[in-house]
Amino acid sequence: MRNFIKYSLYIFILSFICSCVDDKGNYTYKDEKDILPISIGEFEKEMTIEVGQTLSIIPEIEGMDNPDKYTYEWYVMEYQVAGKAPERQDIGNTKDLNYKVTIDPGVWRLSYKVIDKETNIFSRAETKLNVISTAVDNKGWYILKDNGEETDFDYINFEGTIYKDVLRKKNLQLPGTAISMEYQQDRYYHNITDEHGNVVTLTNQSVFHVLSSKEIYSINAKKIELFKNFEEQFYSTPEECDPQYCIYVYHGTHFLQNAGRLYTVNGLIGNIGKVFPITGTYKLYKGGGIPMGLKNCIVYDEATNSLLVGDGYNDSFIDMPDLKQDDSIYSFKHMPYSIVCIAHNCRSMKGQGYIVLKHKDTEEGALLRAKNSSSTAITSFSIVPKESKLLKTDIVAPAFNADFVYFKHNNAVYSYENAQDLSLEDKEKEVISYPEGETITAIKQAFSTDINQLAVLTTKDEKWKLYIYDLLGESNPEINPKPVATYEGEGNGRFLLFRSN
């Protein structure tokens, strides 16, 4: 009986397969152009516009014989959201778009649909739309400055337009002298209370962190509105207000240093934009650190003459690994060196940083290189002759890719090539000099897909001046000595920020 059932099942399956194979069908297939004969041409990959301006787009549509046969939809959705579904906002219903921008500043996905009225079949195109509420939230140069009592910044876009006293126009000047500023492009969180008394968390915000000798502001970059002041930056506000620097690492993780102590926030998890302290007994060098990888920052502890690695995901330091180079092993704990300066040219896990040290006994120097990647290791240790001018500087500007640095000495900019087979005369050279009394306050290499320039900021008589030079290659420090652009403004220029995104 069991065999009979089994053989009957085989015959049934075989009959079903044969019937499928023999079925010739009676189907009619239509070309997609017969169903919807139109196609939308490609949009620009990315568009940028300010709030209040009119966004006009005339799409290229092929195959359209009668525009009245179709309906049209223009709409936007948030490009990136955290913890919620993106909401659609309709902005037009005509073939061509002519829309005065009223949506909030941010990054949006702009979509266009052409829909057949009879079949409801549609064709769609989309692009990335950057909406900004102020012209200062864009690519270019930011000059942090002060008048001796208040801190502000000026902005220069890539077209050469200067926007002066950005904070004063919103009554947001910081008390004290300028120290540094940083741009955080995304994943900043901030709590507000709405009109009903409910606490709402703003997610994925972009901010400027601005530091003066007496205050720290985190400012909404799109609206130039204050998010947090010094007291609001911390879960537990320090007794001493001594801002020293801020470093943005990646994906919302950033570090803030105050009075020799390091604080951080993890941008990959929900937070309210406040920083928590890195624990331990230490007192950090106030001149900066080096962002590394997704979540770390290299700093120098003056209490122990050691390099430490702050971990943005934890409340303690992690060990700096030893460096194995040639036949030597270098430890970065309790070094016989004092620090000269530290600087970086890092962004989005690219670029590099350098640390300049000076031996306490021999006065010989050391130059430590760190590449910005997922590793937190120092990648090279090089001896610097004690006669080098590099050991007397307070401003170092790393190249973005190549193994050399620019630095300040008196009223001139020098380069130092980190190659042990060169004599000091060959590796250390003057690049450009400036008139007496014109003090160099910042040096920065601007590097992106279409820019390779050197910027030098000077100050004289409470007026700043910015010189932009073309570099003659990625792997060498030579410049065209004639500036391609020179800009001037009011105030003591103290810090230079370059944005390429």
Image (cartoon, rainbow, N blue to C red):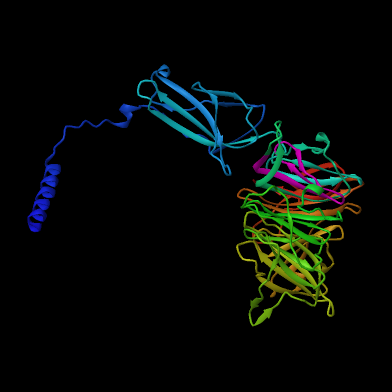
Q: Is residue 207 magenta?
A: yes
- Residue 387: x percent and y percent? 83, 73
Query: Is residue 372 or residue 427 the one in the foreground?
Result: 372
- Residue 121: x percent and y percent? 37, 27
Q: Check the image and report above or below for 321 versus 81.
A: below
Magenta part of the chain: 200-229
Answer with left or right where residue 486 lies relative to residue 185: right
Query: Is residue 406 or residue 347 the one in the foreground?
Result: 347
- Residue 287: x percent and y percent? 80, 60
Answer with left or right where residue 313 lies relative to residue 384: left
Picture residue at 85% right of the left edge, 67% below the top: 392
Any part of residue 466 in sight: no
User: What is the quadrant of residue 380 in the picture?
Assistant: bottom right
Q: Is residue 431 magenta?
A: no
Identify the image quadrant of the C terminus: top right
Picture residue at 76% right of the left edge, 60% below the top: 262
User: What is the quadrant of residue 220 in the picture?
Assistant: top right
